[in-house]
Structures are given as C-alpha cells and as structure tokens.
Amino acid sequence: MQIGLSHITLVLIVSLATATAAVLIIQLLPGYRRRRGIARKTSGGMRMIRGRIVDCDADLTRQLQRDDWDNTLPSLRKYFSFRYSDVPAEFVGDTDGTVTYPARDPEDPSLLRIARRGQSVSVDLVDSSVADPMSAHLRLYRDRIRALTRWSAMTAPYPVWLTDVDGCLLWSNTAYAQIEAESGGARPDGRPALPPEGEVRGLPDREQRRIRFRPTPAVQERWFDLTERAFEGTHLFHAIDVTAVVRAEVAQRTFVQTLTKTFAQLSTGLAIFDRNRQLALFNPALIDMTALTPEYLSGRPGYLSFFDKLRDEKIMPEPRSYSTWRDQILDLIAAAEDGRYQETWTLANGCTYRVTGRPHPNGAVAFLFEDISAEITLTRRYREQLDLSQAVMESLDDALAVFSPQGVLSYTNESYRDLWQLPEENSSLDQSVRSATGMWQDRCEPSPIWGDFRDFVVGFDERTEWDASVRMRDGRMLDCRFKPLQGGATLATFRVAQVSRLVGIQGRR
C-alpha cells in the first residue's frame, strides 16, 4: 500500500485539531480554574529550616543580599512592619502555628502570613490584586526607603548639598536653603553658597575644614565644619554649625591668656602637671625660686625629672635614702592628687618654702611654691622677743597677773605664785576673775576693792589706771595697781609694802 503526501498531511491536521480541543477542554474544567486562581493570590515568600534558607523568592533574595542580611529572623521585621500592623519584634513566635497580619491601610487587601512548624518557618504574602505579591511589596519597601532617605536629608538640622563634577549645585536641603538665603540667594555661576570666599582652616587629625561664613557685614559671623565625600564625580557636603564651639575656644584662649598674665604677676611659684604627669604650665616666680632654666621647663619635663632636678639644685631637702627616693616622689604625687600634700622645705641656703599640692580637673596636679622665709624669720624673732619679755617679767619682784578682755587669767609670774602661795604645778591660769579675786579675798582682810576690780576687768566704759592698798591676813600691807592694757586686757600688780621693816628699824633706834 502506498502512502502519498496527501495522506500524511491529513494525519497531521487531525492530530493538531485533537490536541487543541484537549487543551480547551482542560481549561474549561472548574478544578483547573480554581487552582490557577490560588496561584495568583500567594507568593513564594521564604522557607527556613533550622535557621537556613531552603527556598526564597528571587526578588527577596536579591534585596536581602543587597542589605547584607544577618540571617536572623528579627531583622526581617523591617521589610514588612511598615506595611503590616502588629508585627512583633521577634518577627516569629516560639510556638507552632500560623499568624496572619493585616495591612495598615484599610484599602490594602494583602496579608502577611507567618507559620512555624517546629524548626521550619515560612513567610508568605497573600494578595489577590497583583500577579507577584512579593515583588510588588519589595517595590513599595524600596519606594518607602527612598522617601525616608530624602525626608531625612531634607529635614536634617545642618546644611547638606550635592555638586556635580564641575562644582555646580545639584541638590540641597532646607537648612542649606536658609544659608543660601542669608548670603543673598543662589550664586549666578551655580556654585554653592558654602564654602564662601573667605577664611578656611584645616582641622588636624580630621577630614574636615572649618570655614568662616559672613557674606555681608550685616550678617553675624558663623563657623561651619565642612565634610566632603565624592562618588563617581558627584560630591556630597555636610556642614555642621560650630559657631558656639569657636566662640568657646576664643573665650578659653582669652581666659588662659588672662590667667597666664595673672600667674606671671604672682610671687608664688606655680607648676601644673597634666594628666600625663608632664609640666604643662609654669610662671616666672618658679624660675626665680628654683633657679631652673626656662629652656628646661619649656621642655615639659615629667614630674620625676622635675623633682630630681630640684633635688640636684638643692631646692628641696635631701632625702634620707636615695633608694626610696622615687617611692617618696610617687607618694608626694598621690598626696597632691588627694589635696593632702603640704610641707615646709627648709633649704641649706637659709630659705624656707611652703609647698602645697592641689588636684585639678581632668587629672592635672598643681604645685604651689611659696617663699615664707621672711614669715619664718619674723615668727622666730617674735618668739624670741616673747621669751625675753616673759623672762624679764619672771625676774620682777612685783607680782603680776594679766586678765583677758573676757575676764580670764592668762598670765602670772613667779612672784605672783609666791605671794599667793600657789604650788608650782598649779599655774592658776584660765581662772575667771571672780575665782581669782575670791582667792585673793580669802588671803586678805575684807575690802571692797575686789568687787571694784571685777567690774573694772569686764567693764566696757573708758578705763583709767588706779591704785589701792589692802592688809593681808598675816599683817602685811599689799599695794595694788590695776592698769588697762591694749586690746581690752587688764594688768594687776601687787607689791608688799615695807612698813613693818621700817617700824622695826625705828624701834631699835
């Protein structure tokens, strides 16, 4: 049997018609239409088992890779919480089950569905309004990030702007617009208002420049720290207003200069060590007192070197043991840090220094060197004169007693103690005038002068010297003299009259 070309053509036409009819019949089946509708509503999302991704939507995978996702579930929250409400901070709960989160927008029909089954976690988006819910969601996410980024830049409290490869302004935020308005508006050449033509300072150890902004004399001077970044010919600028910082620095320099001038006029030597224990500040008085050269002090020696130099120059007492010298210096610094160091240095050249250590903020320590040689000499002379005066009064035959303005006995001599028969161990000092006059009255015959004397000692009226005589119980006459002293003190002088001796001489004649 021979098969011709017409037969083959007929067979192909019949086969094609049969296949087309079969496809149409399948599409008309209700089950097929239902399954296809479900596929349009659900996105593949993400599947994780034991913390590892086993299946993930392609667009979501690219987004996570772009953001350097750290493979933790809580960090997934930011991709969905802007659109869906009540998403927990941990993103996925610890218990098994499925949780569905509705959209924040009531007109948004999509749902976020998170399911946990043991170590398996699935994240899906259900949205019947789009063909690919996850891709549509990520477009919304990126649009929101761009909007937030632009909003953040526009509302930044400091000027931000972009320039092209030619230096012309491309974009700027609101804070920059205020600066531009202060400078009189946009420049004709299209360049930014900052940095203006004027003073520019480089800041050490920082990728910043400090610029002075004062476009017109009527505008108050301002200072900005300018930071620049470049990317493919585009330059990004950030300007931070540091006017307050610059003014504080100027005030600090002025204050330091004032202090320096003040320290230069002081007669007290000053040495301030910083937190690194290096000499940071000294005044001319320190050079005069220590004989250390300005070159040495300007070299900022450490405190150990400084005190070693003082010892070498014999400006501080020689230590008893050189082996413990460093320990003594460390103890000195520790005491100064606590504000406890104060010593008097008596030097071989006859000078006497009072050295005081005081702590300062930020760990600094200040040492004050005060020359008290004249004060020490004056004190010694005063003590010598006081001792001499006391020796003279002790040698007098008259009994002396001195009362303070408060009526307290403050001094007596040996003749006083002999007259009133007081033991040596009982100096009778610190007695009140009432107690002292009571003791005198017991050893004398009654007399009104003791009451008058008490009033005289504590009286506030103008006082004049006066005399009186009393008879002691042993028959001797006692001449008394009461004299006001400088400062309100009172001197009482007692002398035994020689009447009995004169009478005896006359009787023998």
Image (cartoon, rainbow, N blue to C red):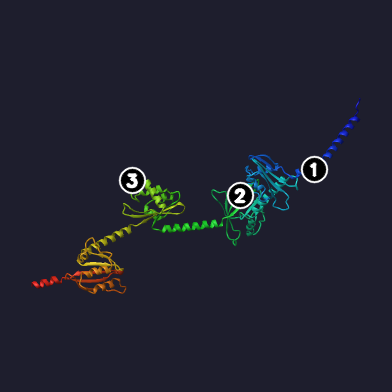
Q: Locate the N terminus and report the quarter of the image it occupies.
A: top right
State the residue position of label 2.
228
Secondary-structure class at tag 3: loop
Amino acid, disc 1: Arg
- Which x, y percent locates residue 276? 45, 48
Residue 321: mark in rendering: 3
Amino acid, disc 3: Ser
Residue 88: mark in rendering: none
Disc 3 vs disc 1: Cβ atoms closer than 8 Å?
no
The residue lying at 54 percent from left, 56 percent from top is 246
- Camera sees residue 34: yes
Amino acid, disc 2: Glu
* Earlier-in-chain disc, 2 versus 3: 2
Q: Residues within 10 Å of mark 3 (few under 14, many from 20)?
A: few
Secondary-structure class at tag 1: helix
Of marks 1 and 2, the one in the foreground? 1
The single residue placed furthest to the left in the displayed view is: 509
* Earlier-in-chain disc, 3 versus 1: 1
- Which x, y percent locates residue 483? 26, 71
Disc 1 vs disc 2: Cβ atoms closer than 8 Å?
no
- Camera sees residue 168: no
Q: Locate the C terminus and report the quarter of the image it occupies.
A: bottom left
Cα separation between marks 1 and 2: 60 Å
The single residue placed furthest to the front in the displayed view is: 96
State the residue position of label 1.
33
Q: Residues within 10 Å of mark 1 (few under 14, many from 20)?
A: few
Nearer-the-camera pick, 343 or 405: 405
Relative placement, left or right, of 182 versus 338 is right
Nearer-the-camera pick, 10 or 239: 10
Cα separation between marks 2 and 3: 61 Å
